[in-house]
Image: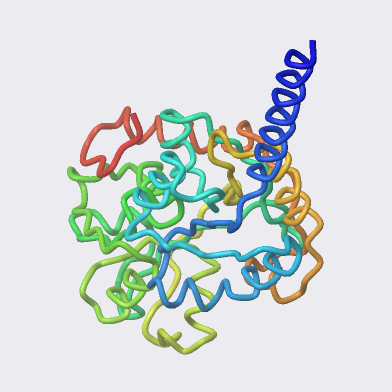
Amino acid sequence: MARVLRWISIAALAATLGLSAANAAERPKKLLIGLLPGESAPTVMRLNEPLRSYLEERLKLPVEIVVGANYAATSEALRFGRIDVAYLGPVTYILQSKRSPLEPFARPSHASVGATFQATIIVPASSPAKTLTDLKGGEIAFGDPASTSGTWVPRWQLLKAGLVSGRDYTMRVLGAHDAVALAVENGKVAAGGLSKPIFERLLKEGKISAGKVRVLEESPPIPEYMWTFRAGFDPAFKDEVRAAILEMKDAGALSVFRAQAFVPAVDSDVEIVREWIAAIQAAGGATAWAPK
């Protein structure tokens, strides 16, 4: 009997130790956040330092920002669990959510426009173009092939004007918004599509000259980027991260996103972008990195 009791005690202790180990493993020792390289990696890291610092203080653990070599690299890292959370544009999210059960949970909301932003198509100041149709036959610069405001929305704007990529204009993929703005400023392309907030910041910082470029057309409102969890992320820690983002009051961290606050996000928020993608694909022509 004593022997049986001894084995029961050992089993109970082992179970307790196992449970403790499982509980201890629930909370990671570091949070890895993935950001898209909409601009150069050093720029993205610099701009998002207030966010990293805020999360590190709020969550009481190290927070590391990882900037992918391109949009695909960031979303693939989320898909395969090499990062825990990523800030994805609608197209990048739509692409990867077909391959992995990702979970969007927050997006920035702005004064007057809510949880939306815009793309813009710009031309050199000396360009004779007055409407998008005037760009027919020219070379137009875009950012990353999976960029929402740097590629897909400008392409949709051009499509609405009757211009199909590969048939009516040549796509020049430059990888980042700032590269597009510089190409237009220097007259290397007939036009370029990029994020309106980034374009306005580049002007404000003097990275491009207001006298050398002008806006030809702005897009309709686009659903904002979404903070997204990878599949299999620990539920308990997920709640901590979600609360840290949605309850953010830190002015420095919010200013990075031009946000008044972060609001909840769900998959259906980006449905209009799915419709724009479908329209571009239905029209044919050069599709770059098309979601399938």
Q: In this view, does 249 lie above or below 236?
A: below
Locate residue 144, reporting x and y percent: 33, 56
The image shows residue 64 at horizontal and vertical percentages of 53, 65
Query: Quadrant of the rendered structure where residue 245 is?
Result: bottom right
Say which of 129 and 48 sits in front: 48
Which of the two residues, 17 or 37, is positioned nearer the viewer here?
17
Task: Say whether residue 148 is left or right of residue 158.
Answer: right
For the N terminus, the quadrant is top right
Disc tally is 0
Q: In this view, does 224 lie above or below 112?
A: above
On the image, the x and y values in percent for residue 66 come to 46, 62
Please state which of residues 81 and 210 is positioned toward the viewer in this rendering.
81
Residue farthest front in this picture? 2
Question: Which residue is located at x 38 percent, y 65 percent?
Answer: 130
Q: Where is residue 278 in the image (x, y as percent from the top left)?
A: 40, 30
Residues 224 and 54: in front is: 54
